[in-house]
Amino acid sequence: MIDVVRLTPERFDEFIELVNALADYEHLNRPPADAVERLRADAFAPSPRFVALLGLLDGKAVGYAITLETYSSFLAKPTQYLEDLFVLEDARTHGVGGRLFDAVHDMARTNGCGRMEWQVLDWNMLARDFYARRQATYMKEWLVYRITL
């Protein structure tokens, strides 16, 4: 059975295990202890900085999504930004990713967003194919820039 639930303090350790699994998958460093504590504080603050959802398969957390709102000046509506969507490899054929994606998409509609956006690593063909099946548009004319502070 697949379920999608909002992250709770009781399930935070499972969430961090999934964040670490995503870091491993993307060949990145896992978040250090101080970052984990900031994630906890930001997730459960009176005004949370993000929403985290867990994808459960038979009650076990096997995937997660992190989402937050940005704002479009041209639409004059919020944009639902999908920061992370990740499912453990051995759980990927069960529909957990689709349920997580649909939950964020539903959140965007409920919140009156004008669109939903996210980024995908160019080498991640599994993710690119996943989003293409959902009729997502690849925005090839937009380039990502970043300044690390």
Image (cartoon, rainbow, N blue to C red):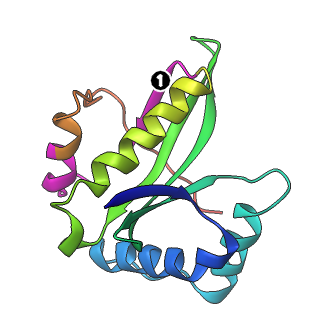
* Residue 21 shows in this picture: yes
Residue located 26% across and 26% down the image: 137
Closer to the camera in the image, 67 or 91:
91
In the rendered image, the vertical position of residue 59 relative to residue 69, given as above or below: below
Q: In the rendered view of the protein, which quadrant contains the C terminus?
A: bottom right
Q: Secondary structure at mark 1?
A: strand
**Left or right: 105 as drawn, with respect to 75:** left
Query: What is the magenta range?
Result: 113-129
Q: Which residue is mark 1?
A: 115
**Left or right: 133 as drawn, with respect to 55:** left
Residue located 47% across and 23% down the image: 115
Residue 139, quarter of picture = top left
Counting from the top left corner in percent of width and height, residue 47 is at: 82, 50
Closer to the camera in the image, 65 or 145:
65
Counting from the top left corner in percent of width and height, residue 138 is at: 25, 31
Residue located 86% across and 55% down the image: 46
Residue located 15% across and 60% down the image: 93
In the rendered image, the vertical position of residue 27 relative to residue 122, given as above or below: below
Q: Residues within 10 Å of mark 1 (few under 14, many from 20)?
A: some
